[in-house]
Image (tube, rainbow, N blue to C red):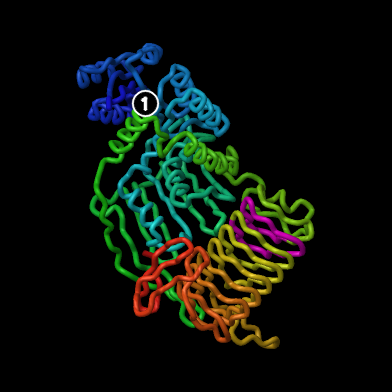
């Protein structure tokens, strides 16, 4: 397959790296640079390339297949548009442009012209970050609880865009990639100290449908250089530190365990995570060339860039020119109100007018909340859920994505439902073991966790302080007093294990005396080991 030929537009601070990399890949055809001294230097260093200051000449060259743009961010939109209209595939450094509306126009233009449009979200091609993504996807960290991203240094100061738009795209792109969903709420605060209206430090907080959060800090006015992403799961934690020359990715067995209904810290020594080293820019440029040659969509294509722009714009909207939170940005959602446009607070969700929804509540798109339900303060309900009639949730409760809660269920503080949990009618949760009306015991709350894909049958009772495992099945009327393993089928009072259930909801068949089993309905295989059932 012929290597596509590239014209690099801009060969300054970062553009010089693109020129070097595309040359190393045998793809450099032209360089467009307005600085005369740089052009002379480039002509000597890359004698096989045509070096000029004429963009139109490069766009009109039929031997040029693609354009790689590394110019000031304010020029990106115009240069991308002109390159696409000239029939060229385009790689552009982040950000795609400085507004979501213009980004939409560029993406539609690329699609209409049948051209490749890729944005340089470099961290997505870092081998350690890709290994981090694999850890998250494989469940090694468990359910993500929060992410912290820090990108601080002294310089380079920009005049065209703020630190949010200069440094933010890297980490926003990675956070969205790790979470695999868009945030439902964004808050931001920035301050400008060197140049009016151009923030030098910016902090952002993103809230996601399932209750996870991300906190981002960007600064180019900081005494230390730090580029770090910390991912905290409910099982383990991972830290990516790009500035660490030895161990860029560490896995921590640390976390929190529960003893007697109380969280206790679990300490552990970090373990370096192996990955195959490769220069991220080399991997990124090679991916672009492969996409141009094969006509497949890049990982960081225009649509991915739009998702990043949407978050950046939402952050920026929360900031005034003086660098303070815009009016109402930190105020949370309105106070409790019955119906009366409650759905207007939660775009894409339906909340029946008879419901009450308290302040500081997140309800994800596609979720439906039916008659006479009450969502108390500080609750998060993920996307695609169905909340039946006469349901009470909260306060301080997290409900994951695509959860179904049937009628007459109360989900109290201390209970958490992960994604795709099913609660049948009149399921009972408790949060204190020995309640008395005359003895306050809210300080003795015990945590109850219902893990992903579990089913709780009608009228089941879940005594507090237990964990219902992934894809477990609690029969109607059962009383659960202890932890239920993944895939276990439990019945009775107290609930006891009588079999095992596939993630599709059918029984797993284990031949007598054998540890290997199979679901006849979907064909998924399982194995038994030490009282547990595992897939594969």
Q: Position of residue 72 (x, y in %)?
A: 42, 27
- Image check: 198 left or right of 410? left
Q: Residue at x 45, y 24 (%)?
A: 80
- Image check: 201 left or right of 223? right
| Magenta-highlighted residues | 357-382
Q: Position of residue 145 (x, y in %)?
A: 48, 61
Q: Is residue 157 visible?
A: no
Q: Residue at x 51, y 83 (%)?
A: 496
Q: Is 50 situated above or below 100?
A: above
Residue 356 drawn in magenta: no
- Image check: 425 left or right of 48? right
Q: Position of residue 62 (x, y in %)?
A: 35, 14
Under circle 1, the secondary element is: strand
Q: Is residue 175 visible?
A: yes
Residue named by callout 1? 68
Q: Position of residue 42 (x, y in %)?
A: 25, 20
For the image, the number of numbered tags is 1
Q: Is 37 situated above or below 77?
A: above
Q: Residue at x 55, y 58 (%)?
A: 210
Q: Residue at x 31, y 50 (%)?
A: 128
Please tell me how crowded label 1 is: few (under 14), some (14-19), or many (20+) other residues with Cα within 10 Å: many
State the quadrant of the N terminus. top left
Q: Nearer the viewer, residue 177 or 151?
A: 177
Look at the magenta stretch and give its main secondary structure: loop
Residue 378 drawn in magenta: yes
Q: Quadrant of residue 51?
A: top left
């Amino acid at each position: 397959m012929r290597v596509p030929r590239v014209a690099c537009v801009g060969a300054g601070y970062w553009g010089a790296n693109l020129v070097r990399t595309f040359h190393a890949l045998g793809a450099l055809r032209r360089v467009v640079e307005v600085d005369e001294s740089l052009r002379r230097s480039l002509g000597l260093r890359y004698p096989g390339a045509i070096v000029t200051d004429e963009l139109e000449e490069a766009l009109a060259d039929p031997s040029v297949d693609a354009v790689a743009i590394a110019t000031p961010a304010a020029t990106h939109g115009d240069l991308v548009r002109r390159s696409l209209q000239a029939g060229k595939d385009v790689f552009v450094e982040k950000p795609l442009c400085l507004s979501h509306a213009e980004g939409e126009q560029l993406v539609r233009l690329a699609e209409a012209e049948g051209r490749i449009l890729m944005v340089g979200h470099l961290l997505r091609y870092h081998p350690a970050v890709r290994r981090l993504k694999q850890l998250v996807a494989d469940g090694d960290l468990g359910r993500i609880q929060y992410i912290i991203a820090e990108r601080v240094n002294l310089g380079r100061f920009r005049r065209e865009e703020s630190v949010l738009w200069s440094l933010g795209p890297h980490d926003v792109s990675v956070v969205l990639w790790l979470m695999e969903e868009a945030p439902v709420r964004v808050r931001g605060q920035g301050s400008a100290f060197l140049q009016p209206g151009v923030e030098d430090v910016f902090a952002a907080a993103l809230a996601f449908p399932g209750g996870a959060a991300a906190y981002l800090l960007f600064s180019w006015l900081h005494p230390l250089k730090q580029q770090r992403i910390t991912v905290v799961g409910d099982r383990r934690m991972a830290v990516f530190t790009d500035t660490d020359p030895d161990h860029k990715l560490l896995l921590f067995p640390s976390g929190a365990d529960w003893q007697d209904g109380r969280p206790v810290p679990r300490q552990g020594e970090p373990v370096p995570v192996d990955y195959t080293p490769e220069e991220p820019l080399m991997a990124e440029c090679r991916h672009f060339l492969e996409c141009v040659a094969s006509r497949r969509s890049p990982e960081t294509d225009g649509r991915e860039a739009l998702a990043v722009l949407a978050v950046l714009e939402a952050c920026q909207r929360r900031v005034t020119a003086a660098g303070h939170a815009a009016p109402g940005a930190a105020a949370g959602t309105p106070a409790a109100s019955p119906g009366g446009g409650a759905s207007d607070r939660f775009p894409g969700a339906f909340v029946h007018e008879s419901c009450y929804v308290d302040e500081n509540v997140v309800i994800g798109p596609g979720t439906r909340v039916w008659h006479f339900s009450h969502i108390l303060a500080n609750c998060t309900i993920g996307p695609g859920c169905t909340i039946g009639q006469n349901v009470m949730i909260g306060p301080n409760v997290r409900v994951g994505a695509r959860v179904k809660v049937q009628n007459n269920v109360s989900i109290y503080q201390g209970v958490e439902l992960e994604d795709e949990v099913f609660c049948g009618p009149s399921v009972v949760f408790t949060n204190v073991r020995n309640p008395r009306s005359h003895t306050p015991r809210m300080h003795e709350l015990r945590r109850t966790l219902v893990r992903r894909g579990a089913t709780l049958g009608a009228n089941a009772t879940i005594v507090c302080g237990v964990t219902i495992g992934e894809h477990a099945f609690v029969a109607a009327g059962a009383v659960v007093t202890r932890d239920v393993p993944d895939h276990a089928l439990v019945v009775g009072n107290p609930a006891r294990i009588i079999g095992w259930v596939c993630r599709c909801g059918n029984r797993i068949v284990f031949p007598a005396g054998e540890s290997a089993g199979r679901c006849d309905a979907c064909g998924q295989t399982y194995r038994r080991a030490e009282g547990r059932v595992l897939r594969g």
